[in-house]
Structure formats: structure tokens, C-alpha cells
Amino acid sequence: MLESIRIFILFAVFLLVSYFPGNSSASIPNEVHTLSQYHFTTPPGLQSKVQFWKKIYSEYSTQHALVHDTKRLDIVYEVVYLGKKPLSRRARERKLEKIKRKYRYILRKIAKSKNKERLKGEEKRVFNLVKKNFYKASRNIRAQLGQKDRFRKGIERSGLYLNKIKKILKIYNLPEELSVLPHVESSFQIGAYSSAGAAGIWQFTRGTGRLFMRVGYDVDERRDPILATYGAAKLLKKNFESVRSWPLAITAYNHGLQGMKRAKKKFGNNFVRIIDRYKSRTFGFASKNFYAEFLAALHVVKNKNKYFPNLVINKPVDIVSFQLPHYIDIRTAMKYFDMSNEDIAKTNPALRRPVLNGEKRIPKGFVFQSPASNLVSLAGLYGKIPKRMKYDGQLRSKWYTVRRGDTLSGVALRFRTSVSSLKSFNHIGRRNRIYVGQVLQLPRGKTRRQPSFRQVDTNQKNISTKLVSYSVRRHDNLSKIAKRFDTSANHLTRINRFKNPNALYPGQRIKVPGQDLLANKVITKNNQNDKLKLTVKSSRVSSLQPKTKKQASVKPKKVISPDNHKVVASINQSINRNRAAFKPVTFSPEAKSNSRIGTITVDFDETLSHYAEWSRLSVRELRKINRIGRRGRIAVNDKLRLSFAKTLPYKFDEKRQEYHKGIQEDFFNNFEISKLTIKSVKKGETLWEMCNDNYTIPLWLLSSYNSDKDIRSLSIGEPIVIPVIIPKNKNA
């Protein structure tokens, strides 16, 4: 009896010790972690996950998808062949959802079955595969696309940068095995961009990237594989110095350092236990499997010839670099460095479109790169540039905030530009729709602001007039005509000198603006009757022509989406992709000009560090002005006070607008909206889950389609418009 009690006590002590881990240095006995060296072996309890990802990277291509259990990756229900022709993301999801639904049904049927011995066929196979917790398993079904073909291409592409990446890691005293991480993140694709805003081969988000490199409207170093590697090395070193464990440090690269520090505080350094038991809203499947993916990728890369015979690895290109001591124009660089615009963009992927288009200068301090040449150095070529072509400052961006009563043609006329240029710069669709608060980017060049519209006499022989003649139709009124011709009723009243604007009659000839005619229309003069005649060069219906009833009745076809959400619009035409502008800085009337305190409204993706950078203040000063504690946070639509003692309000707004414009451009360069659906908010559903887990769309995009709602407080059952996005010109 006493012996049995003693055995029971010893067993209980053993369980307590195992449940409450000490401060052991690692999950593997006698494991030693150092900054520069670590033996990356698979910890006990992680073998099934690593083995699963080995198969994903080396056995199954993107033509296959594995339907599996999210918790136990050794349970694979079916390998689905998707076909040789790549499917769109939505089509692939529909196909896989049917198969997942089948196995959910089977598992729930097994769970309800009282006599498991009577199971036959597919049910018996699934029973022997899962063995227990069938109802729980029915909620853990997931599909994973194979990556063999992408991984092979990634290995071939990696030859361009791998040697330099390893040298950089060595500079920071880091293990060279970390050079495998870009395989997991992006398959070494330079132009990789996620819907969450992560860019480059290292997949830095804007927020994280700004901590270690230059991320702005003119330069985004996340896009440059070498410059981004320096940032990745700094981040990985910081992670390790904080958690003192490479499995945790690598997982923190995906999940975030603060999350891993909380996990370590709760479970110690037992990595497997953290994976199994640590719970957090953001610690999902991707974060839990990130280290396993890394170990699997490391194994496949070390044995690449075994898994991928006949590899053709790209050879590295010799690059010379030079840090620019001044701001220079892109045309100047093309001329004196003897490079085309395409060559500069290829060797300097960090330069963004505004620089390549000439809207911005190549900034001072930028490390300019060029293919190596034995003839002369970049420094020598730079010395030949005249002093008048070297600048001390950046070009100012030209923006205009749409006000009430503004039209696209009116804005174009005011700033002496064309409607077509405004549409091109701001991605505006055929209908020329703009709205109050929208920020328009003005084309750089011969743009000069005019205070008002010019009145032009159509009876003049000079055909350069901006006005055309229009015959009033039945049921027309001034508002309808103004909307039809993309102008305002007040403008029509002014140019026609109406005494009574409401006294229009059918057949009356009035003047209407034909501003620039959208670059595809030509105004000609009929010499016989001295009337203006409209000639359309393109096959598209002119917006200057009155809309018929038949045209007005055309509506987009409504269908029902596979997720049982109502489709409210089928995007078969270009849409206005500009989000609503942030509210500008406001000042109290009694504020002094020397130390003015302005008020702003917090917008999406904005932090205190952004405001500190744009206003040239410190975060500490901002917290003091707004009485925000150390752990205090800001939320969208909050009111903040800013001091403009060190910068001007227009400069602050300019930097702020460039930040949001950059986010928007990056997104729409890689994704497009296929349709809009309506979804009702469910109980317990958060906006974060809706954007990240269900649809993978940025929050600012969701908000722009629900501008009439308070996005912070949604009610149960409230309808939300969801834009469904797809990769642009890609089959994902």
C-alpha cells in the first residue's frame, strides 16, 4: 500500500515538473543557442509538421492541393488534382470547398455513429486515419496548395542574390541557414506583394520595414533584395537578443516579437509546447507552422539536386553602387549614367514609380546601382553632371482635395491639364466620378492654377474653344445636363448667362463644356451651317453624348456567390480606386502662428511614429500633448493634437498623403476587385477576422466601400459590402 502511494506521489511530481517548465535554454536536451551558430535540427514533436512541408515543397506542385487536418498534419484526407491549366483563386477555393464539405460530413457521421464496426468504404478509411475526436477533426479541415514548381524556380532565382545574402548575414554574425527564409516567404520573387501589404523577398510590412530601412513614396527599400537583407538581418538579430532562442526568433519574424515574448513568459523556451498551447488571436496556422516550414525548406535546399535534378541556377550579376550626395532627376541619371529607364528600374528596384515617371527626384543618400563596367566608375560619371542639375531638395507633390461642386473637367481647367491625364494619374473610370474629400494627384508639368472658369464665345472662328452646343431635350433640366456633361449647374448658368435657369424648353440651344474631349474626341466645325459637330474616334460611347433610356437602364448582372453572399455589383468596368481622403488639419481661430496646435483625425494604418516623423516631433512629445500614457494606444477616428512649430501644415499633409497614396498604388498594382458582395455581421465576428481570415483584404479598402458606417462598432446582422479581390494578371 505504502509503495503504491509512493509511486503515485512520484508520478504526480513528474507531471507537475513537466507542466511547469523551468528556464531551460531550449526544447531539445543539451541544446545550445548562440547568435552566430545553431544546429537546426527538428525538435521532438515537430517531425510530422516538418515532414508535411517537405512534401509540399518537393513532391506536390501547384497542380495539386492536400486536404488535411490543421492540428495533425500527418492526417491527409485526399490529394486533389487541380488540372494542368491554372485556376483562379476563387475557382480553386470553390473546388476545394466541395471536397472539404464531403469530409466534414463523413467525420460528423462517424462521430454520431454508435457502432463503428459497421463502417465501410470511405467512412472506414477516414475512421482508421483519424481514430479519435471526429467531431473536432471536422472543424479542422484545411487545404494546402503544393509548392514544388515554385520552390524550384525560387532555387534557380536565388543564385542571383544568395552569395551576397550570406555575406550580409555573416556581417551581423548570424547563421547562414537563415538565407533560406526568402524561400518560405516569397520563393525569391522580387515583386512579391501580399494583400496585407508585405513586399519583397523578405516580405516586410510597411510598419516593420520602416524600423530598419527607407520606406516612402519615392523609395521603398523592401523591394531591393540586398537592401532588404540588411533590414532582415537587423530584425532577426533583435529577435534573438530578446528571446535567446532561434526557433522563437524565427517564429517572431512571422508572428511578431512581442507575441513570442508573451509566449515565452508563459511556457518558457519549450517551443513545441508553445506551438501546441499558446493561444492568441493572431497566432494562427501560418505562425504555428513557420518554423516547421523553415526547417523543411532548409532540408530541401541542402538536398536540392536530389529533389530537383537538372537545376539551372541563375548566376549573380556584378553590380557597382554609388551613394548620391544630391537629388537628381531620372532623366539626368539616364543621360549621364548611360542607362535606359527600364535598366534603372531593373537594377534599382527600390525606386518607385513617381521617381521613374519624373514626378519625384532620386533622393539624396540613395545607393544607386548599375551593372559593373570596366570603363569608368559611377562616381566619375556623377562628377560630369552639371551643378545646376544637382538639387538640395525633393520636388513637391501636387495634390488637390475635391470640394463640393467640383467636377473633373472643372479641376482640369483650373489647373491647366487634361481630363485624360487626371483620369490616368488617379485611376478614375469612364464615368469620371469624383467625390468630396477625394485627393487627386495633379500631373506635373505645365499645370498652373486658375481661380475660375474662363468664358469662351462659341461664335469666334477660333476652334480652340472648350464649349460645344447642346439641344435641350424633353424632361431635361439644368442639373441633369450638368451631370451628363461632368460639370455643375452653376457653371452652366454662368457660361450661358441664364436669367432664369429653371426656364428651359425642348429644342433650346445652350453651351456646355467639352473640355479636352477625353483625348479621344475631336471637335470639328461644319462650314455649311456654322454649327459644332462632334466626331468620335474610338468605338466607345462618348460621355459628351446624351444618354438614351436604353443606355441608362443597363445594370450589372446580379448573381449569387458560392459563399451564399449576395453579389451587389459585377466589376466589368474600371472603378474609381481612390479611397476617401483623410480629414485635413484644423486650427482653432485663436491659435498663434508661431506655435500653432492643430487637430487631426486618425486614419487607417497611421501610428504615433508616423505623426512624429511627419511633424518632426518625438513620440514622447506627441504623447505629452495628447496626454497619452506609455501603453496608451490610438484608434481610427480618434482626435489628436499636433504642434506645427517645426513644420508647416501643408508639408505634413503632403507627407501624409504620399504615405496613403503609396499603400494604395502598391495594392492596385498587384490586385484588382472582381466583385462586391454583401455579408451580414455574425455574433462574435470581429472586423480583423473579416479582413484577414475570411477575405484577406486591407481594412482601408473595406472601409472605403462602407463609408456610411462606423467601422469601429458594427452591429450583429448589419450588412457590410465586401470587395472580393484577385491577383492582377496572375493565376494564384
Image (cartoon, helix red, strand yellow):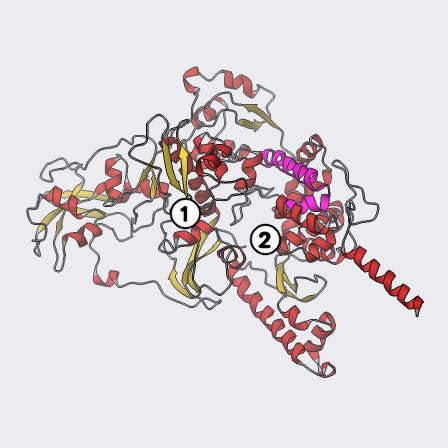
Say whether disc 1 or disc 2 marks the residue closer to the N-terminus. 2
Kind of residue indicated by mark 2: Thr
Residue 406 sits in which quadrant? top left
Mark 1 neighbour density, 10 Å: few (under 14) some (14–19) many (20 or more): some
Q: Which residues are magenta?
A: 224-253
Give the residue drawn at x 48%, y 27%. 363
Is residue 155 found inside the magenta-colored segment of the image?
Answer: no
Q: Position of residue 584 (x, y in %)?
A: 35, 39
Q: Which residue corresponds to mark 2?
A: 282
Q: Position of residue 31 (x, y in %)?
A: 81, 45
Prevailing secondary structure class for the magenta stretch in the rendered image: helix
Q: Quadrant of the C terminus?
A: bottom right
Choose mark 1 or mark 2, whichever is in front: 1
Is residue 243 found inside the magenta-colored segment of the image?
Answer: yes
Q: Any mark on residue 637, and which?
A: 1
| In the image: residue 275, left or right of residue 557 | right
Q: Position of residue 564 (x, y in %)?
A: 46, 69
Mark 2 neighbour density, 10 Å: few (under 14) some (14–19) many (20 or more): some
| In the image: residue 533, left or right of residue 318 | left
Kind of residue indicated by mark 1: Asn
Q: Examine the rendered structure and indicate whether residue 245 appears above or below residue 72.
A: above
Q: Secondary structure at mark 2?
A: loop
Give the residue drawn at x 62%, y 43%. 188
